[in-house]
Image (spheres, rainbow, N blue to C red):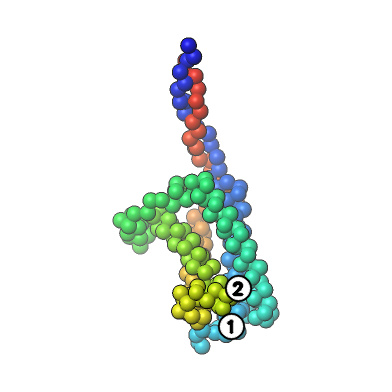
Amino acid sequence: MTAPLTVKSTRRHRKLHPAALRTMHWINAIAMIMLIGSGWKIYNDEVLFGWLHFPDWMTFGKWAQHGLQIHFAAMWLLFINGICYLLYGFYTGRFRRKLLPIRPREIIANVRDALRFKLAHDDITHYNAVQKTLYVGIMLVIVVQVLSGLAIWKPVQFQELTALFGGFQGGRLAHFIGMAAIVGFLMIHVALALLVPKTIGAMVTGGPEVPEADVHPAPAE
């Protein structure tokens, strides 16, 4: 008779941040910076708030039309790369492993620790509840940015979508608020990276090796 098979568990190691993930991360970063800078140039051409203008040195493009061209180019870059990132995150289960679950009591506890400057950040292989919330939140904000961007880009062709934002100006306001949320996220993200420099290195080199369960069927001895 053939010997029954048993499951033998072995452990192998992989980089914390695979090469594909690191590439998409930096492409997203470049696209976001281009979108923000060019968006500010477009905004300056027809401001929402009379008291708010962005200095030229902070914007991309000599004129608003140039800013618009850069904005569209960066938009497609972010859109295509973002789709790849989402597919990768769901297909590999990375989102489920790294971002879930999110528990309100853990968020409150992390915020309290942060306010007391006691938030642990030695282990870069795990996200705390605040980090999970920020990453999930920014992905949702980007989705709204895409929708509001379509609404103000083609308000006639996407009139139903534009109506959801309360019209063209409502779409502009939603897009502006989303931009502010993304800028805030980037500032927090960079500040945390500077506080824990090894996180920057990890996103360049892949970071430390972490164990990964690999189950193989093996004949019983």
- Picture layout, residue 118 above or below residue 141: above
- Image quarter of residue 47: bottom right
Residue at 35 percent of width and 57 percent of height: 107
Q: 162 left or right of 72?
A: left
Q: 61 left or right of 52?
A: right
For badge 2, the amino acid type reads Gly
Residue 30 percent location from the top left of the image? 62, 63
Q: Tag 2's secondary structure?
A: helix
For badge 1, the amino acid type reads Asn
Residue at 52 percent of width and 47 percent of height: 91
Q: Which residue is mark 2?
A: 37
Q: Nearer the viewer, residue 179 or 87?
A: 87
Label 1 crowding class (10 Å Cα cut-off): few <14, some 14-19, many 20+? some
Residue 52 percent location from the top left of the image? 52, 84
Q: Nearer the viewer, residue 155 or 8?
A: 155
Residue at 35 percent of width and 60 percent of height: 111
* Residue at the outermost left position: 105
- Image quarter of residue 104: bottom left
Residue at 53 percent of width and 34 percent of height: 12
Label 2 vs 1, first from the N-terminus? 2
Q: 147 left or right of 99?
A: right
* Residue at the outermost top position: 1
Residue 176 percent location from the top left of the image? 50, 76
Numbered tag placed on residue 44 in the rendering:
1
Residue 9 percent location from the top left of the image? 47, 28
Label 2 crowding class (10 Å Cα cut-off): few <14, some 14-19, many 20+? many
Q: Nearer the viewer, residue 23 or 75?
A: 75
- Picture layout, residue 2 above or below residue 106: above
Q: Tag 1's secondary structure?
A: helix
